[in-house]
Image (spheres, grey):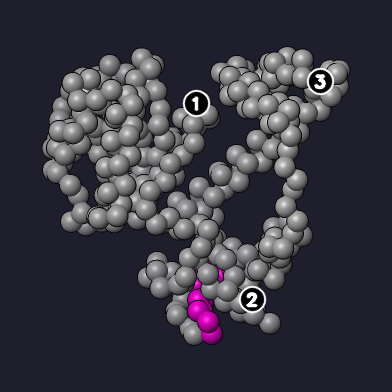
Amino acid sequence: MPYRASKIYYDGSHYIAVPKENFPSRKGRKTPMKSSPQADNIKAKFETAYAESQALPKRERRKYVTEKLQDEFTDKTQTEEYVKRQTERKRNNAYKRYTRLWHKVYLQRNWNFFVTCTYSDEKHTEQTFQKTLHNTLKHLVSRKGWKYIGVWERSASERLHFHGIFYIPENAMVGELKQVSDYSTKQHRMQTTYQNTHFLRYFGRNDFKEIDKNEVVQSVRYLLKYIEKSGERLVYGGDLPTYFKSDVMDEDIVCPTGIDGRKALLFDDFNCWDEGCLIGKVSPETISQLPKCN
């Protein structure tokens, strides 16, 4: 019996189907009760202490957070239990974001640039740089079809940068890419970069490095390094779904997979269907014709 309109993602090696029959909707379930002002205050203190603790060695982080919250509870055991639960929540949420990121990365397979952008003091303050770059990228997404996944990061000198992987469609580049040779104070040698004249004019120094599909994973791990270091979240731009949808036939399933076997591992050449109509064997072209979701 086929699965209807299953959500499907690519994990870097195989296609995995998530049949809706095996994952009932949460709609209709009771919503949790609103927390009290006191609970909200404790949670806010936890979030602050947790963010501050990220600069410490891992073995010292929980101890730091516990000490910051010890006055909010009657004894140390209660404090430790609360910190443990909240830390597990943070880890679970981080894992979900991490998983969702890779699904989006793999589904959009034609990433073609790794971009770094900073600002000139003559053009911006840190605040205007962040706001203006956000608006510029927003317009490039809507008008030119750009897509990106990026992160804000501070250099050793505390200067704000933006790093991201980009998909820039053919003939959708703004400005020109010009080769520039200069001295890298970080690498202590001469380097060659390609600066975009539009971004140079409105922001300052930048680097548009072309990447191929073999460099995408390395580039994403580079972004994740900054998240782990700073606690910043990734920012997304453009149409970047997590899944595509397709009916899944029994003959296209290799075996059950995942917790309790609720997911299905698919053959690399499985057929894609939309509302009972055969679209074709899985490929970027076929996937482009199928509905998407998050």
Front residue of 120 and 170: 120
Q: Which of the image's four quarters has the N terminus? A: bottom right
Residue at 18% x, 21% y: name it: 122
Is 13 placed left or right of 50 in the picture? left
Q: Amino acid at mark 3?
A: Phe
Magenta stretch: includes residue 265? yes
| Horizontal relation, residue 279 to residue 129: left or right | right
Three-letter amino acid code of the residue under disc 2: Tyr
* Residue 266 position by quadrant: bottom right
Choose the circle earlier in sequence order: 2 or 3.
Answer: 2
Q: Nearer the viewer, mark 3 or mark 1?
A: 3
Query: Which comes before the other along the chain, label 1 or label 2?
Result: 2
Under circle 3, the secondary element is: loop
Amino acid marked by disc 1: Ser
Residue 110 visible to the viewer: yes
Question: In which quarter of the view is residue 130 placed?
Answer: top left
To which residue does mark 1 refer?
230
Residue 187 x %, y %: 31, 20
As measured in the structure, the alpha-carbon distance from the residue carrying label 3 to the one carrying label 1 is 29 Å
Mark 3 near mark 1, Cβ–Cβ under 8 Å? Answer: no
At mark 2, the secondary structure is strand
- Going 15% across and 33% down the picture, which residue do you hit? 201
* Neighbourhood count class around disc 3 (C-alpha, 10 Å): few under 14, some 14–19, many 20 upward: few
As for residue 107 lying within the magenta part, the answer is no
Cα distance between the residues tagged 1 and 2: 42 Å
State which region is magenta.
Answer: 264-276
Q: Which mark is on residue 189?
A: none
* Residue of label 3: 73
Q: Residue at x 44, y 79 (%)?
A: 280
Q: Which mark is residue 3?
A: 2
Up-down relation of residue 265 to residue 184 (above or below): below
